[in-house]
Image (cartoon, coloured by chain):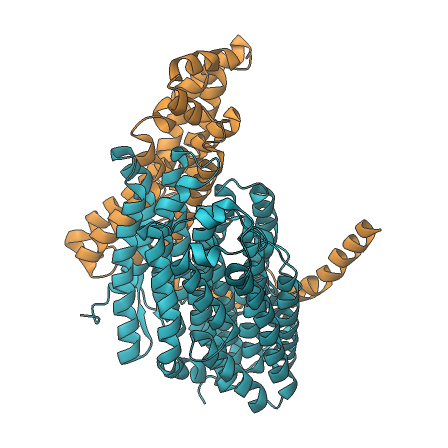
Chain colours: A cyan, B orange
């Protein structure tokens, strides 16, 4: 069943078609958009499951829209890294279900906006899926634009106080980084005459003449994607944007959208490792250092945040730091750890944002001091939050442990023990600020009546939170499966083309 | 102090870009990779393989159809983004109309808010309107033979809507932006790719495939025209709707 080739076209087109139909569905029944979006994502998840099963069984495979052979048409290519569509579908589904109740409480979220909100979510998810599965550079850019544009709007859609300003800042940084990526694609096309990623790699490897454009293209791609991934010092757009967005959107943005910057970085590496045109040691060192600085700075800023959502947003910078550092280590262990952390951090951060969203929904407060004692009033949500907190610190047996362990091993493998220590130090800092949160929620006396009187949220919000939280635990116990799954992809990534 | 530093940084970062551009193959060099690899194939075989005498259309809709599907989705996303942010803030006609049920009064206000236009301009716009519409239709429907196509024709059509709205008031655009038909028109580009792509999958076995064998090559022509029309309607509706909301706020 998974061998049916069209799943790959369906996984990309279903969310986009669903988005175009959402305003039409809203005309027929005003309350239908969330359920329509949910149905769309259910089908997309089915397609994604088939694709992940297939890549597990057969290794990477392609789909040729229009039937045109690779360099002439656009190629969709599903490899081990594309399996991120599985987690995109999962978190997207949960975020939509969570939104169905949550958005009713948003200020200024008139019901007129509802169909457009769900259409934007579907476009965002579809853009990410397309980005992850395409094998063509220009197609990559097109999907990058879909996911970025919808991301900017999703930040502003909740109508919180600073949301519009945050979205505008995000828009400016995002637009500049997109232009850099486009410019780089132009350089690569000018040098090779092709846009297919595999073809560009091969022709770049056989290049004669000046290599300066290829080097500048590499720099532009790196800066562009690292900005999308919010690595220090290009992270300035992230905290406000992720904290001001509605919580289910924060889960999608923080859990998934920044990761697509990392996927873009992996695609870039594939081209340049494969072409073997340059020695990438310098870039790797830059990424290692930026990653390390992001880990420490993100964690450091997070400690001083009173606003829970801002704290989670800074913690994302820290965790992307782990991933970028793992990539920069350029050893098998390091890159495997980084790749799996893309999956695991998505689960963990979505759990945290949904749990915090549920708490904000019930109490109306969002700072640590206001939320004292909420753990007793909303026990299930708080347990989910605590599981997320333990996972993100990386305490075994949760999902965060194995990938951080692998990145540490990678640091020692690369003979860079310093970075191994940075990682452990970062984990300690993270531990400090999450312990602050757990302490405030469980062991301090509440200061607001709303907090003590808060009840558990409705099932449509509780269920996604609990499912994601239990996945954090399950992925900790079954942690070896993604590690072995991604390994052939990583080995292929790091190897030069043709031996 | 910050401004000179910023300008200096921008100029500094321009240096590697200029160096890189200088390192690219010379403009118009016939032996450059951009002319010898993929595009050479398009020029040699494109008209015959892709079924469009206009090679640009052949590449856009056939060889790289998925890119075009993505591009129309980007345009659609821009519209949805504008609507999602502006609706419900009390600045758009929709929100006022639906929340207060006062669309008639609002419509009357609207008539009076039309900027005063000279009767000559108004007459000329109305006089030219059918010809502009005809030109748009020509650009759209002839796009696979001569330069033009859905994107360009759609932009002309949107320009016509906007010009008419300036002289007649935004009521002229009601059907595009305010009725049950509106979401169909706004999503037309994306939906036409979905429909044509699916039909292609049934005919050729590939999503967005166009049949090239003799009995079905007429279907290919029709499918390409369907895409052009879909892109044009979608593009025009998106531009017109955004204009309407900008105008209202």
Direction from residue B161 to residue A179 in the image, left or right:
right
Residue A145 in view of the camera: yes
Up the image or down, A205 lies above or below B19; here it is below
The quadrant in which residue A87 appears is bottom left
**Can residue A187 be seen from the camera position used here?**
no
> In the orientation shown, which residue stands out farthest toward the right?
B1
Left or right position of A387 against A41: right
Who's the residue at 35% across and 32% down the image? Answer: B137
Q: Position of residue B154 (x, y in %)?
A: 40, 36
- Above or below residue B234? Residue A399 is below
Q: Nearer the viewer, residue A291 or B12?
A: A291
Asked if residue A354 is positioned above or below residue A136 in the image, the reply reads: above
Report the front residue among B175 and B1.
B1
**Residue at x-position 20% and y-position 61%:** B205
Q: Quadrant of the C terminus of chain A?
A: bottom left
Q: Residue A419 location, x and y as percent?
A: 63, 82
Q: Is residue A287 left or right of residue A267?
A: right
State how many labels appear.
0
Q: Is residue A390 above or below residue B48?
A: below
Residue in the picture at 48% in, 42% down: A157
Q: Quadrant of the N terminus of chain A?
A: bottom left
Q: Position of residue B194 (x, y in %)?
A: 28, 49
Image spot of residue A27 (x, y percent): 28, 33
């Amino acid at each position: 069943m998974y061998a049916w080739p069209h799943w790959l076209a369906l996984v990309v087109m279903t969310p986009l078609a669903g988005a175009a139909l959402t305003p039409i569905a809203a005309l027929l029944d005003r309350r239908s958009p969330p359920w329509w979006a949910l149905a769309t994502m259910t089908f997309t998840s089915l397609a994604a499951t088939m694709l992940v099963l297939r890549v597990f069984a057969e290794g990477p495979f392609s789909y040729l829209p229009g039937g045109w052979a690779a360099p002439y048409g656009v190629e969709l290519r599903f490899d081990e890294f594309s399996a991120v569509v599985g987690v995109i579908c999962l978190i997207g589904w949960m975020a939509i279900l969570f939104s169905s109740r949550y958005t009713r409480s948003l200020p200024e979220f008139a019901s007129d906006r509802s169909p457009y909100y769900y259409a934007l979510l579907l476009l965002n998810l579809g853009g990410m899926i397309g980005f992850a599965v395409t094998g063509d550079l220009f197609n990559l850019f097109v999907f990058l634009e879909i996911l970025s544009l919808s991301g900017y709007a999703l930040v502003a859609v909740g109508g919180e106080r600073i949301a519009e300003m945050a979205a505008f800042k995000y828009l400016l940084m995002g637009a500049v980084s997109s232009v850099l990526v486009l410019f780089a694609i132009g350089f690569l096309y000018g040098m090779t005459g092709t846009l297919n990623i595999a073809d560009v790699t091969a022709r770049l490897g056989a290049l004669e003449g000046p290599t300066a454009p290829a080097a500048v293209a590499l720099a532009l791609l790196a800066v562009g994607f690292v900005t999308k991934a919010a690595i220090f010092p290009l992270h300035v757009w992230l905290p406000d944007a992720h904290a001001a967005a509605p919580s289910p959107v924060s889960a999608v943005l923080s859990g998934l959208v920044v990761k697509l910057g990392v996927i873009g970085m992996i695609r870039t590496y594939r081209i340049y490792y494969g072409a073997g045109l340059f020695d990438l040691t310098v870039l790797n060192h830059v990424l290692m250092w930026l990653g390390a600085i992001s880990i420490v700075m993100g964690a450091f800023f997070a400690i001083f945040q009173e606003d829970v959502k801002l704290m989670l947003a800074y913690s994302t910078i820290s965790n992307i730091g782990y991933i970028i550092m793992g990539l920069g280590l350029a050893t098998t262990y390091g890159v495997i750890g980084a790749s799996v952390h893309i999956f695991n951090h998505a689960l963990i951060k979505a759990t945290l944002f949904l749990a915090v969203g549920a708490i904000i929904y019930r109490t109306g407060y969002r700072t640590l001091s206001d939320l004292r004692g909420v753990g007793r009033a909303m026990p299930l949500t708080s347990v989910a939050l605590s599981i997320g907190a333990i996972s993100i610190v990386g305490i075994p047996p949760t999902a965060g442990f194995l990938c951080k362990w692998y990145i540490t091993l990678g640091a020692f493998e690369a003979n860079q023990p310093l970075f191994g220590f940075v990682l452990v130090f970062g984990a300690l800092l993270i531990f400090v600020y999450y312990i602050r949160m757990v302490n405030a929620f469980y062991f301090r006396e509440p200061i607001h009546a709303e907090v003590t009187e808060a009840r558990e949220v409705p099932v449509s919000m509780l269920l996604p939170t609990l499912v994601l939280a239990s996945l954090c635990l399950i992925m900790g116990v079954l942690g070896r499966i993604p590690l072995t799954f991604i390994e052939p992809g990583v080995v292929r990534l790091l190897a030069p083309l043709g031996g | 102090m910050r401004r000179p530093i910023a300008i200096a940084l921008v100029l500094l970062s321009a240096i590697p870009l200029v160096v890189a551009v200088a390192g690219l193959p010379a403009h118009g060099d016939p032996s450059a990779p951009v002319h010898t690899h993929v595009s050479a194939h398009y020029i040699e075989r494109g008209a015959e393989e892709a079924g469009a005498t206009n090679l640009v259309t052949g590449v856009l809709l056939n060889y790289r159809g998925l890119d075009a599907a993505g591009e129309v989705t980007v345009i659609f996303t821009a519209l949805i983004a504008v609507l999602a942010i502006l609706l419900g803030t009390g600045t758009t006609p929709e929100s006022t109309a639906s929340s207060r049920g006062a669309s008639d009064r609002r419509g009357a206000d609207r008539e009076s808010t039309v900027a005063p236009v000279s009767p000559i301009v108004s007459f000329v716009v109305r006089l030219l309107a059918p010809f502009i519409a005809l030109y748009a239709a020509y650009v759209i429907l002839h796009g696979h033979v001569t330069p033009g196509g859905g994107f360009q024709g759609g932009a002309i059509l949107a320009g016509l809507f906007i010009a008419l709205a300036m002289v007649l008031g935004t009521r002229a655009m009601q059907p595009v932006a305010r009725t049950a038909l509106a979401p169909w028109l706004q999503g037309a580009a994306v939906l036409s790719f979905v429909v044509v792509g699916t039909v292609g999958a049934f005919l050729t076995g590939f999503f967005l495939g166009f049949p090239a064998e003799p009995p079905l090559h007429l279907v290919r022509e029709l499918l390409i025209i369907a895409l052009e029309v879909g892109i044009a309607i979608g593009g025009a509706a998106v531009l017109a709707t955004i204009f309407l909301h900008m105008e209202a706020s």
